[in-house]
Image: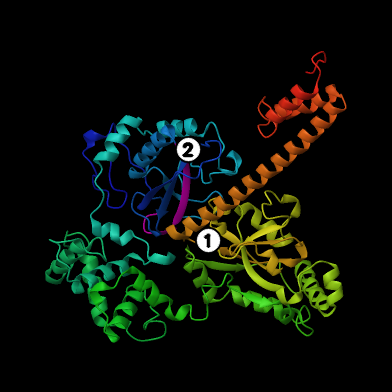
């Protein structure tokens, strides 16, 4: 019978569901967005539906493969066309999620990691573009194939799913509040979130009978929980979250984490109270109203000292003038440059930078193929020193049309790709033969922060970290860097991450859409240019009375345009034929 995947209690009367159905997916959230201005490729004229699946890490339950063991987390985004068929499929996918059929716990087929949260038997499109082989659109068969997979999994018809989804009652507000993400991409674990709700409840003066609390959606439930927990003496109380609330309040009252490195205002490393204690005690010291502390205040408290060295208005995490990196005495002989770059991406600040942009739970693995003796590093250093030497000769630099050396910098950037490509890239660098799109010109494309290339990881949890030598003119927007020369690109490390926040995923989606729009605009301009050249040739041949040759070009243009002449010149050519060809001449 249908049960909650977390507590295994009934979520609806069995009569509402045809048959017995329940998967073993860990607890999570499914958030749905629509974008009328952005279409899945192949469904132009319709908007798109984005589905964000978020499964937190946790402990495997009795119904999982290894009860008691830790399981990982995942954050996935899937796409559907916002048309009648897409909406019908969405409803069936909602039913599947509510019955724990979307994900499962096991070994990841892509990474080989055990106890991972992986897709179950229902395939999803994780990109609105890129084609079927890259789990994207266009794919004419996807909607029917996915419906067939849902049929095989026992998901009922669209009509039955509509009735179920409409009748489904979500958990109480306090449960939803505990699962909400913190603003700006940082998340609290469940212990810290519960403590925040309880502390808020003790200081909030809002009257539930007038207006809803503007700070916390589950404020009234939090107050009821706190009142119950403070007066409860039962060891096995069945009141929801009672035991957890008593433990959180007792821990906070003991003040075990009130002192020590990283625990004052701006710190907060304890997994049971952490930044919540830092925020409330910091606010108390300056006399702020504790009842008005919100999730953004918690983020600000946690960020206060960790990001003190970062300028978040800057585009890049690391940006240093090339001359200071490649001057004589610094380089391959002692590895100073390599050590500096590796230490930079291994720092806590680097992971905080990723976390700040919504790429959470990060860890860095250095490139095992990179050393002071590796060809990649030697080539990179040689190019860097060459740049410095050319700076000394202004004439030489200007002859080559290159930016002056003051604009050349070494920057840390990010590149997303399928996990199967990572080892080859770490060993050999990016292959220029694989370039495609090139909306901003020839070269390899990088992002200034890790949220942007998430969509190009194709559902994986790893991306590449590069050091690049780039001029100011290589920075096409504040997010995109294009580097043409391979010798100016050095793969330093791999950034692995557990999940991407909603804000991070929104940034990634924006990045993909922006590049697609640029690609479409470039292709449109190229098409118009080709059509203009064809029109010029046709008119020239008609003027020379080379009618067969003109007809061949005309027919070729029609075949590329679905059988009709290009609209940009069809009427003009027709007028030319009418005005310049005698009635007794035959033209195909």
Judged by its main secondary structure, the magenta piece is strand
Question: In which quarter of the view is residue 453 placed?
Answer: bottom right
Question: In which quarter of the view is residue 284 placed?
Answer: bottom left
Relative to 268, residue 443 above or below: above
**Residue range highlighted in magenta:** 66-82
Which mark, residue 128?
A: none
Tag in front: 2 or 1: 2
Residue 540 % position (x, y):
84, 32
Write the residue at 36% across / 53% down. Answer: 28
Residue 199 as seen in the image, left or right of residue 111: left
Q: How is the image coloured?
A: rainbow
Could you tell me if the residues under marks 2 and 1 are in contact, i.e. CB atoms within 8 Å?
A: no
Write the residue at 61% across / 77% down. Answer: 343
Q: In which quarter of the image is the C terminus?
A: top right
Pick the residue in front: 279 or 534: 534
Pick the residue in front: 580 or 103: 580
Residue 547 as seen in the image, left or right of residue 29: right
Q: Is mark 1 on a helix, strand or loop?
A: loop
Task: Identify the residue under disc 1.
Answer: 451
Relative to 580, residue 256 above or below: below
Mark 2 and mark 1 lie on one chain; the one further toward the N terminus is 2
Residue 319 % position (x, y):
63, 75
Write the residue at 55% across / 43% down. Answer: 135
Residue 1 in sight from this viewpoint: no
Write the residue at 83% across / 72% down. Answer: 397
Q: Does the segment drawn in magenta span residue 68? A: yes
Relative to 436, residue 423 above or below: below
Task: Identify the residue under disc 2.
Answer: 46
Q: Is mark 2 on a helix, strand or loop?
A: loop
Whole-angstrom CA distance, mark 2 to mark 1, is 26 Å
């Amino acid at each position: 019978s249908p049960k909650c995947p977390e507590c295994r209690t009934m979520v609806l009367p069995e009569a509402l569901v045809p048959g017995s159905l329940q998967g073993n997916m860990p607890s999570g959230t499914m958030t749905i967005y629509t974008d009328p201005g952005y279409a899945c490729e192949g469904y132009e004229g319709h908007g798109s539906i984005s589905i964000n699946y978020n499964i937190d890490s946790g402990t495997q339950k009795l119904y999982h493969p290894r009860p008691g063991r830790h399981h990982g987390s995942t954050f996935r985004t899937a796409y559907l066309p916002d048309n009648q068929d897409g909406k019908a499929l969405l409803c069936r996918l909602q039913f599947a999620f509510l019955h724990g059929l979307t994900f499962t716990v096991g070994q990841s087929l892509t990474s080989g990691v055990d106890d991972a949260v992986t897709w179950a038997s229902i395939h999803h499109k994780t990109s609105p573009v890129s084609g079927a082989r890259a789990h994207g659109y266009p794919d004419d068969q996807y909607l029917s194939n996915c419906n067939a997979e849902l049929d095989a999994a026992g998901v009922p018809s669209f009509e039955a799913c509509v009735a179920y989804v409409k009748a489904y009652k979500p958990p109480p507000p306090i449960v939803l509040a505990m699962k909400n993400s913190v603003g700006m991409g940082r998340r609290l674990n469940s212990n810290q979130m519960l403590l925040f709700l309880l502390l808020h409840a003790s200081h909030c003066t809002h009257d539930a009978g007038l207006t809803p609390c503007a700070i916390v959606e589950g404020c009234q439930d939090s107050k009821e929980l706190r009142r119950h927990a403070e007066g409860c003496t039962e060891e096995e109380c069945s009141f929801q979250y009672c035991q957890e609330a008593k433990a959180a309040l007792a821990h906070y009252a003991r003040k075990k984490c009130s002192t020590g490195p990283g625990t004052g205002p701006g710190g907060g490393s304890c997994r049971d109270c952490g930044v919540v204690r830092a925020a409330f005690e910091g606010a108390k010291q300056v006399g702020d109203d504790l009842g008005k502390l919100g999730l953004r205040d918690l983020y600000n408290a946690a960020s206060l000292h960790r990001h003190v060295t970062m300028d978040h208005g800057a585009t890049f995490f690391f940006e240093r003038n090339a001359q200071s990196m490649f001057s004589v005495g610094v380089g391959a002989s002692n590895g100073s440059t390599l050590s500096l770059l590796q230490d930079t991406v291994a720092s806590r600040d680097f992971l905080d930078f990723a976390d700040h942009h919504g790429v959470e739970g990060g860890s860095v693995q250095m490139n095992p193929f990179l050393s002071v003796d590796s060809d990649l590093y030697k080539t990179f250093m040689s190019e860097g020193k060459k740049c410095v030497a050319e700076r000394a000769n202004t004439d030489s630099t200007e002859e080559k049309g290159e930016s002056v050396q003051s604009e050349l910098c070494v920057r840390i950037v990010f590149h997303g790709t399928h996990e199967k490509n990572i080892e080859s890239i770490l060993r050999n660098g990016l292959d220029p033969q694989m370039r495609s799109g090139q909306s901003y010109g020839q070269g390899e494309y990088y992002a200034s922060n890790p949220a942007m290339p998430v969509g190009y990881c194709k559902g994986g949890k790893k991306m590449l970290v590069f050091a690049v030598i780039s001029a100011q003119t290589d920075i096409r927007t504040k997010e995109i860097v294009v580097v043409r020369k391979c010798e100016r690109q050095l793969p330093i490390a791999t950034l692995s991450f557990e999940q991407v926040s909603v804000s991070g995923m929104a940034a990634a989606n924006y990045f993909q859409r922006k590049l697609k729009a640029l690609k479409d605009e470039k292709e449109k301009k190229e098409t118009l240019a080709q059509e203009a050249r064809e029109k010029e040739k046709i008119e020239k041949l008609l003027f020379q009375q080379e009618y067969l040759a003109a007809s061949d070009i005309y027919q070729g243009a029609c075949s590329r345009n679905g059988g009709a002449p290009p609209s940009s010149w069809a009427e003009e050519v027709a007028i030319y034929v009418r005005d310049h060809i005698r009635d007794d001449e035959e033209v195909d």
